[in-house]
Amino acid sequence: MSQKPKQSHGLAACPGCAEPLDSGDRFCGACGYDLSAVPAAGEGPDRPTVAIGTPVNWPDAPPREPGSLSTMTQHPGDLPGTDSGGHDLPPAAAPTGDFELAAPDPRAAVRVDDPVPAPAAAQAPAPVQEAPAEAAHGSALCVACRAGRVDTDGYCENCGHAQPRERDHMERELGGVAAVSDRGLRHHRNEDAFAVSSTTLADGSPATLAVVCDGVSSATRPDEASAAAAEAAGAALLAALPRGTHPQQAMHEAIVAASRAVNSLAEKAADGEPPRNAPACTIVGSVVADGLLVVGWVGDSRAYWVPDDRAAPAARLTEDDSWAAQMVAAGLMNEAEAYADERAHAITGWLGADAYELDPHTAAFKPDRSGVVVVCTDGLWNYAEGPEDMARVVPADAADRPLHSARVLVGHALDGGGHDNVTVALVPFAVPPQGAGPA
């Protein structure tokens, strides 16, 4: 799929009104914004994403077939920042391929592009990924009166109280990785979803993974989109890692699989017409395997690194596909100003049949100390946005008690107001002791 051409003024959309721009524009045709005032690339502040550790010498990712939907994966050197000791990262070779941040949608709810073809057959999610289901309606006791039975329509036969739906609160812990998702205090349903699991690499070494998805509320059936994406991505990782696929490549392909699963939910439009208001969601995932920490994402769900030693710096490992991130990257606003704007959370990347294009981001790190990866939706990071803020609210024993710690983080968001659905997964990362070898 073709990349969007780079603009000479460094922006694909007007900073004032988000109107799409052409490469030769000097002023915005909609609001008259002076584009010559936009700083040149490289003059603004560094992007907020921070890389940790040193690059891992994994072999090159397998070549892609001609016509593949996937683009080149990113490499650790793509993300500027410091290592976990606070030192500048060594220079890395420039990656091949051309990356561009998609333009923000000025209409916020209507997005168009050619849909990604759905797979011939839907991938069945591995049973280990599913959150434990609650008791079936008709046999459960009412949560309100504790006396009546719950009818098949989800209401108590005795007091008429509506019962919590299965996805209102979900928890899962498996193989040292855990996740918790909650509807929050303001939404009528939970539009988040997750998949957590553990597996082994081709050499028998362990690997843990977590995928978190956030449904786009302005689109139709966002809860179905997030569930389909989480299931497909988790299943793809569980299939790819044991057969020896490069973990970063496996993450990239998992996002492609998630995109196809979400696209398959879109209703068919008239001939020649793009899907409108199709189901959509964001995605973020992490894999910890053999000393490597891999993250992948599309949208504004995030991954953070929090070391066990809180004297060492925490880091944000992802960069939002959002209007606010674009403004910061262009040097037009600092982070505080950008995220205070009412347009801050307008996303510029998502999974869905009406997305501009599929542009997965992946990065790999090798931390030099133990810690935990926090994979979450904006329902959590809105209440702990900076890496230091996140480190303060993550319990000190998170690596040893991931489920308990995930509950604490969800509680932190609910105590802060719970304005959105809240989902968080915790993936511990352990550095083997010096001199330790295989058993």
Image (spheres, grey):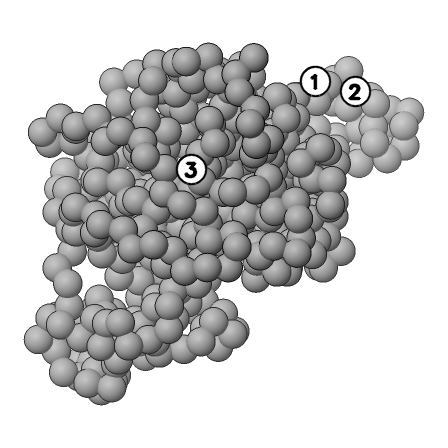
How many neighbours does mark 2 have within 10 angstroms: few (below 14), some (14-19), or many (20 or more)? Answer: some
Q: Look at the numbered disc 1 and give the secondary structure of its residue.
A: loop
Dot 3 amino acid type: Val
**Front-most of residues 290 and 231:** 290
Circle number at residue 49: none
Residue pointed to by mark 3: 294
In which quadrant of the rendered image does the N terminus lie? top left
**Which marked residue is nearer to the observer: mark 1 or mark 3?**
3
In which quadrant of the rendered image does the C terminus lie? top right
Q: What percent of the width, then of the height, locates residue 119?
A: 26, 23
State if disc 1 and disc 2 touch (CB < 8 Å). yes
Left or right relative to 7: residue 372: right
Report if residue 123 is visible in the image.
no
Q: What percent of the width, then of the height, locates residue 433?
A: 60, 31
Cα separation between marks 3 and 2: 41 Å
Task: Place residue 314 in its image quadrant.
Answer: bottom right
Dot 1 amino acid type: Ala
Residue at x 31%, y 66% (from the top left corner): 106
Residue pointed to by mark 1: 136
Cα separation between marks 2 and 1: 7 Å
Q: Look at the numbered disc 3 and give the secondary structure of its residue.
A: strand
**Front-most of residues 250 and 277:** 250
Residue pointed to by mark 2: 140
Residue at x 22%, y 77% (from the top left corner): 40
Q: What percent of the width, then of the height, locates residue 7?
A: 15, 68
**Front-most of residues 304 and 338:** 304
Dot 2 amino acid type: Ala
Vertical relation: 353 (above or below) 123? below
